[in-house]
Image (cartoon, rainbow, N blue to C red):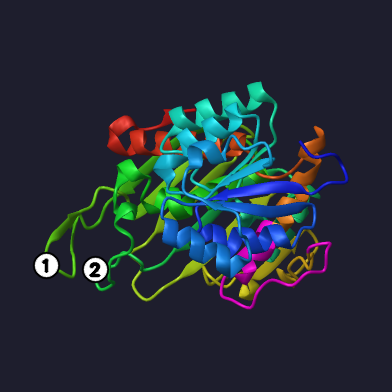
Amino acid sequence: MPDNSSPIRVGLIGVGWGSVVQTPAFRMVPAYDVVALCSRQQGRVEAAGEKLGVADVSTDWQSFVRRDDLDLISICTPVDLHHEQALAAIAAGKHVLVEKPVGLDSVQTGEMLAAAEAAGVANAVCFEGRWEPPRLKVWEMVRGGHVGTPFLASARSGADYWHPTRGLQSEWMYSKASGGGYLMGMGSHDIDYLCTLFGEPEAVCADVRTTTRERSRPDGTTLSVDADDTAVLLLRMRNGMLVNILTTAVAYQRTFRAFEAYGSAGSLFMDGDLMRSDQMQVMSGAIGQDSAEPMASSDRKPASGAEPPARRAAGAIVSLALMLEDWLPAFSGQPTVAASIADGHRVARVIDAARRSSDGGGWVAL
């Protein structure tokens, strides 16, 4: 493992999101150094290595995670590979970063959490949405006591990605067994964020739906769909408040993200486009104000001063870089606010409970 003056040597498995977002984010934080890439497809990993300037590439993840010259394994592979790869990396004594969703269900995420805690390795999950400028501002204000005793909060996220008028996305996304669906893919961010703000949920009641169960492929064959495109969750929190979360991928000609929180001392809410956090408007209400007032989003930037590549994913890159900065104390055994496998496991437990509730379980205790 590195000493305090040496960069944390990162080996990255999966070169899709890993190339577009993770590698640029790591490079904005000098304490990390992406030194090796791994992917099942030789041509793809070689192309990624050439584009990113990483000469060390591999197609064998089993040996990759055991390498003595890697300190941290970042897992950016399909969801159904996370469990096996994370456990192997942890068993090899590596720190791990796992893309969300962490696993296919809470059984897998629980095993990953137990292994990481037993091994004492630093671990994190890419819930970088907490560090988006408007969300980071709201997080700071909630921690500062702006809403007082919280009564009610809600989060809504939606788009038309699975509307019947839209073409197919990657086919694994339509399969529950592969980790697909938008409660896992999009709603998980809102579940994590609201639990970060307001603590632990104690029960869930939900309706989780697959609106269109068959889609036509371009070649005329039919794709069966069992992953969800729409979900409405109601959470009872341990602190006594209620939380509502809505996620949909069938909102025709709409992409949106909204948040509201109301409490004894004030309120916070924000609204905007799902993919444009830079245009999200944060509003604040407080005792003594005549009406809610606009608030500036967080202006925090990576300490290195580095700028992200000029691409659509620039916002996600910066948010992840901030999370990676906040994760650094964990490598010295210190507390961190970075999202961990424990947070990913909590989200998985909520999603499992929501599915059981939707199948007829009513309120499901956590």
Quick check: 228 left or right of 203? left
Q: Give amino acid for label 2.
A: Pro
Examine the structure image and report whether residue 305 is included in the region drawn in magenta.
Answer: yes
Task: Tell me: residue 361, above or below residue 319.
Answer: above
Q: Residue at x 33, y 30 (%)?
A: 361
- Mark 2 sits on what residue? 164
Q: Taken as a whole, is the magenta stretch helix, strand or loop?
A: loop
Ranked by sequence position, the earlier of labels 2 and 1 is 2
Q: Is residue 218 above or below residue 8?
A: below
In percent of width and height, residue 116 lies at 62, 28
Element at badge 2? loop
Please identify the residue farthest to the front as the structure is shown: 55
Q: Between residue 321 and residue 244, name the one nearer to us.
A: 321
In the foreground, 64 or 323? 64
Question: Which labelled disc corresponds to residue 220?
Answer: 1
159 magenta-colored: no
Provide the secondary structure element on which disc 1 rests: loop
- Point 59% across, 34% down: residue: 66
For residue 91, side relative to residue 120 (left or right):
left
The span shown in magenta is 302-320
Q: Name the quadrant of the N terminus.
A: top right
User: Which amino acid is tagged 1?
Assistant: Gly
